[in-house]
Image (spheres, grey):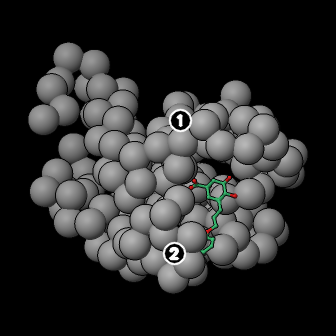
Amino acid sequence: MSCRILVLNGPNLNLLGTRETDVYGTATLESILADVRRAAAEHGVEIYDVQSNSEGELIDALHEARTRADGVIFNPGAYTHYSLALRDAIASISVPVVETHLSNVQAREEFRHTSVVSAVCLGVVAGFGADSYLVALAALRRHLAHQASPTARAD
Ligand code: CA2
């Protein structure tokens, strides 16, 4: 099954690998995306990506995904915890979105325990560092394959 997945990253994730490496790891966003592209290619999945520090641009990318993508891997960064506009944008598209975090947000400060987007996402992956994106890719790919043909195997 061929499909296209958007990997969408929110504020400050362009700085990955430069600071707070104890929390977020040493991988840069570019290297994470390269790993996702490599894993996706093995299954004939096409990846495109958008990173933005602006809420409006993330909303635009979600709207555009309606016609450009079959699924979205989305790390909304700190917007996770309070952006009702992003929640509404996810709810307004029928494309499945996997909320993805490098860190285990539930094991961190109290304000990170709340996600306003989880309830409108297909699922949540958090706490596996850069591998969270690969876990999200595998889960989303299998979900899409199953949707396309309920009796088909995804692997
Ligand atoms: O764990 C995640 O992936 C987060 O979405 C990362 C966000 C944080 O606000 C969320 O609570 C959890 C922060 C990304 C900040 O990235 C930085 C990268 C380099 C240096 C400093 C911050």
Question: Do we see residue 70 in this rendering?
Answer: no
Which residue lies under the disc numbered 1?
A: 124
Q: Residues within 10 Å of mark 2 (few under 14, many from 20)?
A: some
Occupied quadrant, residue 143 = top left
**Residue 36 seen in this snapshot:** yes
Label 1 – label 2 distance at C-alpha = 20 Å
Is the residue indicated by label 2 positioned so its CB lies within 8 Å of ligand 1?
A: yes
* Residue at x-position 78% and y-position 38%: 110
Task: Tell me where residue 15 sits by quadrant.
Answer: bottom right
- Is 74 situated left or right of 148 in this image? right
Please tell me in which quadrant of the rendered image residue 31 appears: bottom left
- The x, y position of residue 22, in whole percent, is 49, 63
What percent of the width, then of the height, locates residue 59?
A: 74, 61
Q: Amino acid under label 2?
A: Leu
Q: On the rendered structure, is 154 left or right of 146?
A: left
Q: Quadrant of the N terminus?
A: top left
Q: Which residue is at 21% across, 58% downward? A: 39
84 relative position to 89: left or right: right
Q: Residue at x 34, y 43 (%)?
A: 135
Q: Residue furthest top?
A: 151
- In the rendered image, residue 25, in percent from the top left (x then y), is placed at 43, 65
Q: Say whether disc 1 or disc 2 marks the residue closer to the N-terminus.
A: 2
Task: Give the residue type at disc 1.
Answer: Val
Measured along the vertical axis of the image, is residue 58 above or below residue 119?
below
* Element type where label 2 sits in the image: loop
Instruction: Label 1, secondary structure: give it.
Output: strand
Q: Which residue is at the front of the view, 78 or 119?
A: 78
Image coordinates of residue 75 in percent, x first then y, are 58, 55
Instruction: Answer with the quadrant where ligand 1 appears in the image.
Output: bottom right
Residue 16: assigned label: 2
